Image (cartoon, grey):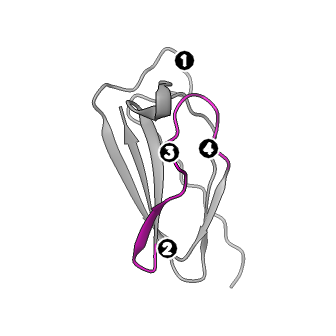
Amino acid sequence: MANEEKTIPFESPGYSRTDESAVYPDNSDCTWDITVADGYELRIVFADMEIEQSNDCTFDYLQMFVDDVGKTNSLKDKPFCGSDLPEAVSIQQANVKLKFVS
């Protein structure tokens, strides 16, 4: 299979690349479900992240889950928040769920 790369950006509600004062709304609950077809790889790269920081990311967070062979596991021990970008993640032949909560 030829190497084929597609970039598909996604962002939270209220995100703006040009307006730094833009904020996401309270009480957001967004889920992105992504299926990785056999023979393909999904690479998730974070370009920008500014999520309210709290202890253990209790209030606002982004969390990734991978479902492979019928078992769902969080890729990290806790959700992501703050402004530190998570490392890029490569996933093959699975279902991926990204969940953003505010």
Left or right of 60 in this view: 1? right
Of the pair 47 and 100, the residue shown nearer to us: 100
Rendered residue at 57%/33% (across/down): 49
User: Mark 2 belongs to which amino acid?
Assistant: Ala
Can you say whether 32 is above or below 50 in the image? Answer: below
N-term mark: 4 or 1:
1
Relative to 3, 59 lies left or right: left
The spot of residue 48 in percent (x, y) is 60, 34
Bounds of the magenta span? 68-87
Gap between marks 1 and 2, in whole Å? 35 Å
Kindly identify which numbered label has been placed on residue 46. Answer: 4
Which structural element holds mark 2?
A: loop
Whether 82 is among the magenta residues is yes
Q: Identify the residue position indicated by label 2 in the image.
A: 94
Magenta-highlighted stretch: main secondary structure?
loop
Residue identified by numbered label 1:
20
Give the mark, 1 or 2, whose residue is nearer the N terminus: 1
- Residue 78, disc: 3
Quadrant for residue 13, please give it. Answer: top left
**x and y percent of residue 21 in the render?**
49, 14
